[in-house]
Image (tube, rainbow, N blue to C red):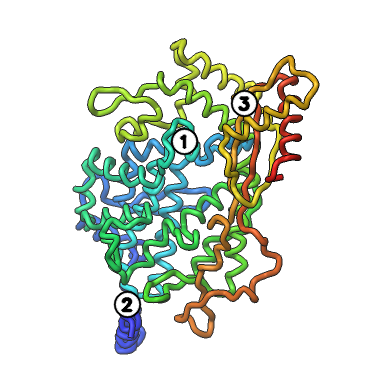
Amino acid sequence: MSVVRKRRNSIQSELGATKGSKKRSCISRFEQDESSQESTISNTSTGKYDRNLIVNDPIHGHIELHPVLVAIMDTPQFQRLRYIRQLGLTYFVFPGAMHTRFEHSIGVSHLTRQLLMNISQKQPYLGITELDILCCEIAGLCHDLGHGCFSHFYEKFLSFADQRGWKHENMSTEMLDYLIQENNLMEIFNEYGLNENDISFVKEMISNKPLGDSTNEWPYIGRDKEKSFLYDIVANKLTGMDVDKWDYIERDAYYLGIPNTFDSSRLMKFMRVIEVDGVLQICLRDKELNNVYEMYATRSKLFRSAYLHKTVNGIELMLCDALIIADSYLKFPTDTNRFVTLSEASKDLTAFSLVNDSILHAIMLSPDPNLDEAKSIINRIMKRELYPLIGKMYLVEKMVKSDVEITKEICSYQSQLNELEKPLLPEDLKIESLMIHFGMKQKNPIDKLYFFSKSDINKAFLIPKSELSYMLPSNFGEYIFRVYCRRNETVYINRAKDCFRLWKEKSSVS
């Protein structure tokens, strides 16, 4: 008999003995009456962080935040998220997309608590404690601390600056340590029962990577295997079904003005924790299959319509060019009285804490003549003199050839054109290969998502392919291959389009 089954039977026996008394392993602070709550808090902490904070969110309504969450929010490292657009440069095309990582992080933290309270109320034998919930809330709140200027754009910039492999998730865990140390937060953490092991648990949830020995059967150190399901709430690498995705789908669709029928509040009411191959996983009621597909389909729609919009993509390439030129002249102070560049700030926590979207205006306002070329590119963005898209293709697999090889091949077709007065150079072209998928690359995310039925709520199963709709796509991921021209003179644009057309006709990928 599994540990969970034993615990469930024990709890059921206790409930029977007490004739209906509703014992819970996790009594929410939000279910206590006001006087009880104030008494509990006053016995725990005094001073600035002795009560919950209520904020009004356009997506989730009123959100109540634990004092520990408020203490984290009241730091320069977290407040920095107010100045980082959630969707980067998308607001240049979608005027409503002005929301930031700040409110998204609060939303993720809120959904984390909502989900765990739903599960805890239905399955008290899981032993979900108030401390478990608080740790998960912290992970949700801090999961994006590592984003640079214009969110995911910063990672694109670093790849052009020869710093491939940098991940914002890893920086988020480093920033959490830095935030706690710089603001002496362990004192208030300890007052509310949090210790170093809990901090490790939070970092493991953010990165979805264990901090323990990878050769161990259970390499995570924050929580035992009995609470394995907690690791899939904020960042679920197995199915992509997590509260981070729930919030950004609902929030982004709202601010972009794109219709959305996905409802996370309904979905979480039909979730249970069930043992699958010896590990506890969060499973869904089988009747919610369509709602799940709606979530993945909405995500794909947001990528197609907004995140990877051709004009947004072109503006990102332009700002990348501007920042590569400006990089050596943009200086950020460190804690050792030296200065680093924008790209080097990715390796220094003090400098990185100062990186946000204001970098755009910093360049425009700088009197440094070394930034004139970068200013010129940014001015083109402001005047809507953008890099024109000269051609695109949809591919099942990513291009094997490098961008340099492809641009040379495209330009080589100029020999078949009549006019060669103003030859097109490979460096005049800019290539982007972007993937759109349902959350699991080329795979169907439902393949690894377990469900349960009304008749047996404690038995998990996979949905057979025969029961899946024939309306589903045959491919769950594809690449968009785009070529832009840095020159905006008509003669170069037309020449680039002609060369791309010839290359596409004779290329093996067409």
Residue 139: mark: none
Residue at 61% x, 21% y: name it.
380
Q: Is residue 440 visible?
A: yes
- Residue wearing tag 2: 23
Mark toward the start of the polypeptide (2 vs 3): 2
Instruction: Quadrant for the N terminus, please.
Output: bottom left
Q: In the rendering, at what x and y percent does residue 54 appear?
A: 40, 50
Element type where label 1 sits in the image: helix
**Cα separation between marks 2 and 3:** 70 Å
Q: Is residue 232 left or right of residue 221?
A: right
Mark pair 3, 1: CA separation? 19 Å
- Left or right position of 8 against 486: left
Instruction: Evaluate if marks 1 and 2 touch, with contact meaning CB atoms under 8 Å apart.
Output: no
Q: Position of residue 475 (x, y in %)?
A: 64, 59
Amino acid type, residue under disc 1 in the picture? Ser
Where does label 3 land, which residue?
Answer: 426
Q: Which residue is drawn at the image coordinates 25% and 44% (left, top)? A: 180
Q: Place residue 23 in its image quadrant.
A: bottom left
Observer-nearest of 163 and 473: 163
Characterize the local packing of mark 2: few (<14), some (14-19) or many (20 or more) Cα atoms within 10 angstroms: some
The Cα atoms of the two marked residues, 1 and 2, are separated by 53 Å
- From the image, tell me which residue sits under label 1: 159
Placement of 476 over or under 147, stated as above or below? below
